[in-house]
Image (tube, rainbow, N blue to C red):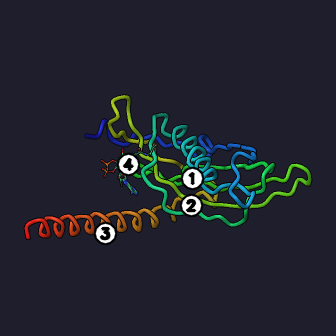
Amino acid sequence: MLLEMTPAEGRPVRDSASTLSEIALPNDANPLGTLFGGKLMQWVDMAAALAASRHARRHVVTAAVDYMTFLQPVRIGQLVVLKSSVNRVFRTSMEVGVKVFVEDLTSGDVKHVSSAYLTFVALDGERTRAGIPQVVPETPEEHLRFQEAGERRQHRLDMRARAVERDRVAAEAAVRQGEK
Ligand SMILES: CC(C)(COP(=O)(O)OP(=O)(O)OC[C@H]1O[C@@H](n2cnc3c(N)ncnc32)[C@H](O)[C@@H]1OP(=O)(O)O)[C@@H](O)C(=O)NCCC(=O)NCCS
C-alpha cells in the first residue's frame, strides 16, 4: 500500500547532494594490496543513501544497483571521496548517481575511479512505501542526468520484468518436473 501520493513541491538537487570521505585502510585491502571492491560498493551504497534520505527526508532502502564501474585501483592510504546526488524521482523510488574520486594525500592528485547508479525506495515509519518530492534540476548537467535517468528507468524495468518472467517459467518447469 502506498502511504501518500508524490508531494507536489520539488526540491533542488543541491539541497541533498552529499559528499562522503573515507580513507582506504589496510584492513580494507584485497590480496593485491589495493582496496577491496566490496568495500567501495559499501561506501557507494552509503553515499547514495545519504543523498536519497536527505532528499526524501524518510528512511530509504536500496532497491537496485544497476551500474558500477571500477576504473582504477584505489591504493591503501588514499582518501576516497564519494559525491552523490538524486538524478530523478519517479513515485516511491528515485535514481541516485555516485561519482567516486581518490585523492593522493601526499601529492594532492585527484582521479575519478568509479561511477554508479542506484535506485532507492522511500519508506514511512510503518515500512510502507511513501511518495517522494520531485527533484528539481537546475544546471545543464543536472537536466541531462534527469533526462538520462528516465531512459535508464525504462531499461531497468524491462530487465526486472524479464527476470520475473524467467523465474515464473523456471518455477513452472520445476513443478512439471516434480509431477513426473
Ligand atoms: C525495494 C522494495 C521496497 C520494493 O518493493 P516492491 O513491493 O517490490 O514494490 P514495487 O514493485 O511496487 O516497486 C516500488 C518502487 O520501486 C521500484 N523498483 C522496485 N524494484 C526495482 C528495480 N529492480 N529496479 C528499479 N526500480 C525498482 C519500482 O519501479 C517502484 O517505483 P515507483 O514507485 O517510483 O514507480 C522491496 O523489494 C524491498 O524491501 N527490498 C529489500 C530492500 C533492502 O533490503 N535493501 C537492502 C538493504 S537497505
At mark 2, the secondary structure is helix
Q: Secondary structure at mark 3?
A: helix
Q: Compute the Cα span from label 1 to label 4.
A: 17 Å
- The nearer-to-camera label among 1 and 4 is 4
Q: Which residue type does callout 1 highlight?
A: Pro
Q: Amino acid at mark 2?
A: Arg
State the residue position of label 2: 145
Q: In this rendering, would 131 be left or right of 29?
A: left
Residues 52 and 103: in front is 103
Quadrant the C terminus occupies: bottom left
Evaluate if marks 2 and 1 touch, with contact meaning CB atoms under 8 Å apart.
yes
Furthest residue in direction top, as rendered = 125
The structure residue drawn at horizontal position 81% and vertical position 53%, both measured from the top left corner, is 103
Position of residue 3 measured from the top left corner of the image (x, y, whole percent): 30, 36
Task: Give percent across and percent down for residue 35.
Answer: 70, 55
Q: What amino acid is found at the position of numbered circle 3 in the picture?
A: Arg
Label 1 with label 3: CB-CB less than 8 Å = no
First in residue order: circle 2 vs circle 1: 1
Q: Which residue is mark 1?
A: 137
For ligand 1, tell me if the residue under mark 4 lies within 8 Å. Answer: yes
On the image, numbered disc 4 is attached to which residue? Answer: 91
